[in-house]
Amino acid sequence: MLYSILYERINDPSLPEGYYYAHIPVLDLTTHGKGIDGAKAAALDLLQLWVDEKRANGEAVPVEQEAFFSQIEINDAVLSA
């Protein structure tokens, strides 16, 4: 099974610098870790636990069909309105 992971730097002063969110969109799962490698390792652990739990309960495990990622920029004036 192949799943896309979206990484995003965490800008939270309560955490040390260098932490990233790792989000698996098709399953709506999010975790975090130190650096991209730490976030990826945390996502893999979370994904394995989640799949094991679904299978143990006889539930279907969604499979990603296709994923796209894009960014869009909006004018700062829109944010301050």
Image (cartoon, grey):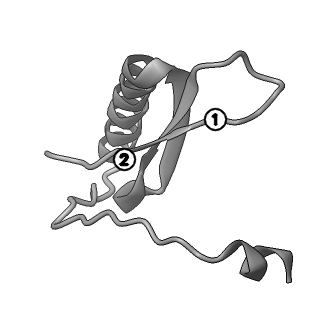
Q: Nearer the viewer, mark 2 or mark 1?
A: 1
Quarter occupied by residue 59:
bottom left
Q: Residue at x 40, y 32 (%)?
A: 43
In the figure, is residue 37 to the left or right of 31?
A: left
Q: Amino acid at mark 1?
A: Ile
Q: Secondary structure at mark 1?
A: loop
Instruction: Tell me if label 2 and label 1 are in contact, CB under 8 Å.
Output: no
> Mark 2 vs mark 1: which is more N-terminal?
1
What percent of the width, then of the height, locates residue 12?
Answer: 76, 33
- Count the numbered circles shown: 2
Q: Nearer the viewer, residue 65 or 67?
A: 67
Q: Nearer the viewer, residue 46 or 80?
A: 80
What percent of the width, then of the height, locates residue 60?
Answer: 28, 59
Q: Residue at x 41, y 25 (%)?
A: 36
Q: Amino acid at mark 2?
A: Lys
Q: Residue at x 63, y 35 (%)?
A: 10
Indicate which disc residue 32 carries.
none
Q: Is residue 28 above or below residue 74?
A: above
What percent of the width, then of the height, locates residue 77?
Answer: 76, 79
Quarter occupied by residue 26:
bottom left
Q: Is residue 16 above or below residue 78?
A: above
Q: Which residue is mark 1?
A: 10
Q: Nearer the viewer, residue 25 or 20?
A: 20
Q: Which residue is mark 2?
A: 54
Task: Name the quadrant of the C terminus.
Answer: bottom right
Task: Name the quadrant of the N terminus.
Answer: top left
In the figure, is residue 80 to the left or right of 4?
A: right
What percent of the width, then of the height, locates residue 17?
Answer: 66, 18
Q: Secondary structure at mark 2?
A: helix
Q: Residues within 10 Å of mark 2 (few under 14, many from 20)?
A: some
